[in-house]
Amino acid sequence: MNNFEKYLQEVLPEKDSLKLVKKEAEKYYKTHSLEECLSMGLELYNSPNFQIQEIGVFLLGYSAHSNQEALAFLRDEVSKHESWKVQEILAMAFDNHCAIIGYEQALPLIREWLNSDQANVRRAVSEGLRIWTSRPYFREHPSTAIELLAACKEDESEYVRKSVGNALRDISKKYPELVHEEIKTWELSSKGLQQVYKLASKFL
């Protein structure tokens, strides 16, 4: 066990503390090289302590812009973790990565992940970027955010559909006309699509 992991075991409470997890991950990122963040992230992810695992996921997200191994590990391994809490961190780590490289530059990656065959990968995007139109680029291009989300309106996973519907609902608070223009074209022929429509139209 490395010294940082020993330190984390001492400072992290038994009860889940997302605020502290984020703080410790960010502090390590700001005081260590990207190579060290990658190495430590992979090591911490193997910890039996789920909060330490979460810090590992954050570190992988921080280092992903300089190392494809980190991004691939998030996509291929972390997405398979059984804990929904770890999946929440995956979404946040993906958003951190997009913020670092720039959301416009991240568009090809966003589309790639939204087309993944893994539901947790697709949800990491729809959930991680919420509120989409609070993010740079999407703030100036809300129609692009709506287009990307709407493409997943009939996702086979209810888990993903709920995230998509809620993300569209978020956007509708500021851009009701744009969301209305999109959802009025939907043919509500399936229960899954009706679920997304109900969520997206809640404030319309």
Image (tube, grey):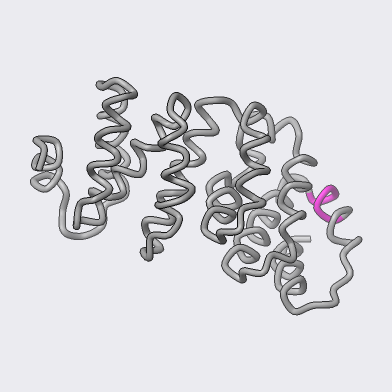
Residue placed most toward the observer, 172 or 192: 192
Residue at 72% across / 43% down in the picture? 145
| Position of residue 11 measured from the top left corner of the image (x, y, whole percent) | 12, 44
Is 61 part of what is drawn in magenta? no
Residue at 25% across / 21% down in the picture? 31
User: Which of the 4 image quarters holds residue 192?
Assistant: bottom right
Residue placed most toward the observer, 41 or 27: 41
Residue at 35% across / 44% down in the picture? 57
Is 178 part of what is drawn in magenta? yes
Residue range corresponding to the magenta coloring: 176-180
- Horizontally, residue 143 falls left or right of residue 184, namely left
| Position of residue 95 measured from the top left corner of the image (x, y, whole percent) | 51, 39
| Position of residue 175 measured from the top left corner of the image (x, y, whole percent) | 77, 46
User: Which of the 4 image quarters holds residue 20?
Assistant: top left
Residue at 50% across / 26% down in the picture? 100
- Horizontally, residue 177 falls left or right of residue 148, namely right
Note whether 106 is above or below 50 in the view shown: above
Looking at the figure, which quarter contains the N terminus?
top left
Secondary structure mostly taken by the magenta-highlighted segment of the chain: helix
- Horizontally, residue 54 falls left or right of residue 181, namely left
Looking at the figure, which quarter contains the C terminus?
bottom right
| Position of residue 103 measured from the top left corner of the image (x, y, whole percent) | 62, 31
Say how many tags the image has: 0
User: Which of the 4 image quarters holds residue 200?
Assistant: bottom right
